[in-house]
Amino acid sequence: MYRSFLQKRLQAPQPLFSVEFFPPKSENAALELLQTAAQLKAYAPDFASITYGAGGSTRSRTLNYARRLHDELGYAMMPHLTCVGHSKDELRAIIHEFKAAGLEQIMALRGDPPKGECNFTSHPQGLSYANELVQLIREEYPSCAIGVAGYPEKHPEARSMGVDLVNLKRKVDAGATFITTQLFFDNTTYFRFRDECADCGIEVPILPGLLSVSSFDQAQRFCAMCGSHLPAELEAQLRAVAGDKAASEAAGAEWLYQQAKELLNQGAPGLHLYILNRAEPAIQLMERLQAEGFYQ
């Protein structure tokens, strides 16, 4: 059976390294994205994901920059795809666009409601759940590596962690290749989540998603948006340097490094960095991890 580069890479002994971009909204932002991607190539990311706006609002930009990073810089790209605002036929067409562009992996997500709406509503001829999207991708593009989202601290809409794990297993059983977690700042949540997944019969790799925060206010915003817990120790460190940009970024970078080192020492299959289209946090982390011998 054919296996994509990513499927093979997930079985390799050295931990995987990946980053996430978002599609730029202006020419200046596009230039920054391409410069960041060029800088990060020196650290050999195994793949880069690129997000997909609510309701398909960035569909053309997601595909455009996925192609550019793939064709011009040689990235193995993983575009996001969501159910929101699309019929099944439209989703099939997008999947085939990704395939025709040589993109061998897709991140399959239900997606958030469009801006200004609180509740998810499926397209009348569309899909309601991420597991249905995984199944559709698997049918239309059998060799594709498929990533899905996991929530170490529970999806905000799930009634309980048990229900959330059942939903995650549906995605894996439908054909997901691996799981990438929502961002977290407390590694105990990842280790507990990994054990709970194993107890449920989920056996695919679980890639931890991490962020280097740059301020206390930013950390609060992300925690509120993602349903993540801000550890008291990190909160105290960020509060102590609030208003000092360099010190705040240094505190966030140090927390990220300590998180990453512990995760890799405890058997995490790699690291997925939410870089917000900025190169420096990832570069600082990879240089330190390379010095420690985690990456060659």
Image (cartoon, rainbow, N blue to C red):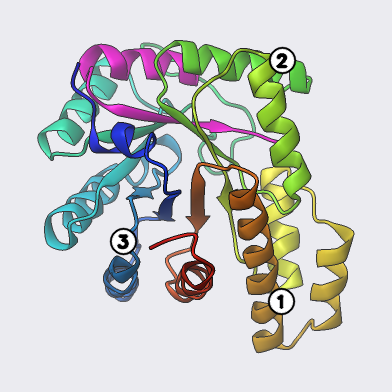
Q: Earlier in the sequence, mark 3 or mark 1?
A: 3
Quarter of the view holding residue 206: top right
Magenta-colored stretch includes residue 134? yes
Where residue 44 appears, as percent x and y from the top left, is: 31, 61
Q: Amino acid at mark 3?
A: Ala
* Total count of labels: 3
**Depth check: 285 or 235 in front?**
285
Quote the CA–CA distance across marks 3 and 1.
25 Å
Q: CA distance from mark 3 to mark 2?
A: 37 Å
Mark 2 to mark 1: distance in Å?
35 Å
**Residue type, numbered disc 2:** Val
In the picture, measured across the screen, residue 25 lies left or right of residue 92, that is right
Residue at which label 1 appears: 251
Query: Disc 2 designates what residue?
Result: 163
Q: Nearer the viewer, mark 3 or mark 1?
A: 3
Residue 185: x %, y % from top left:
72, 54
Whether label 3 touches label 2, CB < 8 Å: no
**Compared with residue 88, is residue 237 higher up or lower down, i.e. above or below?**
below
Q: Can you identify the residue that label 3 sits on?
A: 44
- Residue at left offset 37%, top offset 40%: 12
Is label 2 in a helix, a strand or a loop? helix
The residue that appears at 40% across and 25% down in the rendered structure is 177
Q: Mark yes or no: residue 128 visible.
A: no
Identify the amino acid type marked 1: Ala
- What secondary structure is found at the residue carrying circle 1? helix
Helix, strand or loop status at disc 3: loop
Magenta-drawn segment? 129-152
Q: Residue at x 23, y 30 (%)?
A: 94
Residue 263 part of the magenta segment: no
